[in-house]
Amino acid sequence: MIERELQQKLTELAAKYPIVTLTGPRQSGKSTLLRHTFPEYGYVSLEDPDMRLFATDDPRGFLATYPDKTIIDEAQRVPSLFSYIQTHTDKEGREGMYMLAGSHNFLLMESVNQSLAGRTAVLKLLPFSHAEMEAGGILRQSVDEEIFAGGYPRLFDKVIAPADYYPFYIQTYVERDVRLLKNIGDLSRFIKFMRLCAGRIGQLLNLSSLANECGVAVSTVAAWISVLEASYICYLLRPDYNNYTKRLVKTPKLYFYDTGLACSLLEIRSASQVVTHFLRGGLFENLVINEFVKGAYNSGNEPNLTFWRDSTGNEVDLLRYDSGRRYAYEIKSGATYSPDFFKGISKWAKLSGATPEQCFAVYNGDVSMLTSHGKVIKWR
């Protein structure tokens, strides 16, 4: 098994809370991580119809059967169980009693917030990070192969070609998970919507444009974006609101949690197609930003990330906040360094008062270097 960076935080919090909740996209390795980290725990999945019926009809009997040290998978399938878990864990007063896992963030967190607030730590597990793949010896040979393959564990565990894996993943997700989150009648239109979102990676989110191309109302598109967010397909990177200038863009940008899934939606069938694809720059940017997102989640934190753009086109791809300081990153898919990498960052640094030590450019070249404007970092 590939070691997951989140394991250390998971073990630490299990010793401090009676319940630990682990959420993330379907097939990101949540059950595997929990069973590997806590081999002495029992395991039950509420995806199993019999277990779901047992937990629904007789929650007290269910908890009497599983009174302690139990992993409950797909816990959001029986929301009524959470109140009984609360009462039971309060009475027992021990740490590490239950590990809850679920792939529907909205449904799971709604139940957690209603019944388990203050009693559970909440962690998020995404597909493999660059560092995890490198440490596990499964990192792809080139950045284009890494973009195309993505990081879902089953691809590596079962040696499945991405072109075979993702279409079935998308089909299952849409036909099963989407219906649980939202009553969508025309699923083919929703799939078209997902493809259109993939074509807008790294771009400002334009709900009206998406609505026009899908033939639905703007309010429907907004609701569908929420569905993608709740099921860990997409996320929105918010603009930075520090008032350095009045002419700031205030629209978020759209990214996918996994570039392999995005490539499938873009109908990219091989890594060689990524090289010449018109969205290669956006996909590389998505890949890099995902590492910051995964790094935060794997440390048990929420990502504190934004981007900056003014109305004249000056832009910083990523701003990261850490210990009260801002760090700026420009992301370029090219393999050759250019001083233009720091054009947008230099404008931002002048307005914000940032120093070159806070400015970085990430590119696909082979050499890291220190310039007068900031540090250039090779992706690999």
Image: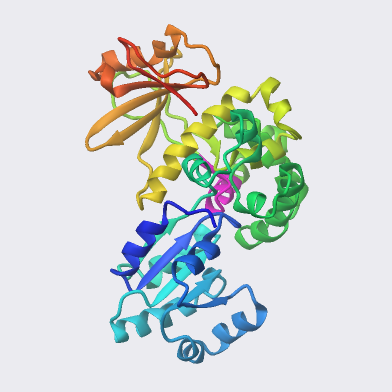
Q: Residue furthest front?
A: 137
Q: Does 345 sit above or below residue 172?
A: above
Q: Range of the magenta residues? A: 222-235
Q: Taking the image as drawn, is residue 203 in sight? A: no
User: Is residue 65 found left or right of 208 in the rendered image?
Assistant: left
Q: Residue furthest top?
A: 339
Residue 292: % across, % down: 42, 38
Viewer-side residue, 302 vs 180: 302
Quadrant of the snapshot with the N terminus: bottom right
In which quadrant of the rendered view does residue 172 lie? Answer: bottom right
The quadrant holding residue 44 is bottom right
Q: Position of residue 22 (x, y in %)?
A: 46, 62
| Whether residue 357 is situated above or below residue 323 in the rendered picture | above
Magenta stretch: includes residue 225? yes
Which residue is found at the position 47% from the left and 30% from the top?
Answer: 251
Residue 113 seen in the figure:
yes
Front residue of 100/129: it is 129
Q: Is residue 70 left or right of residue 57?
A: left
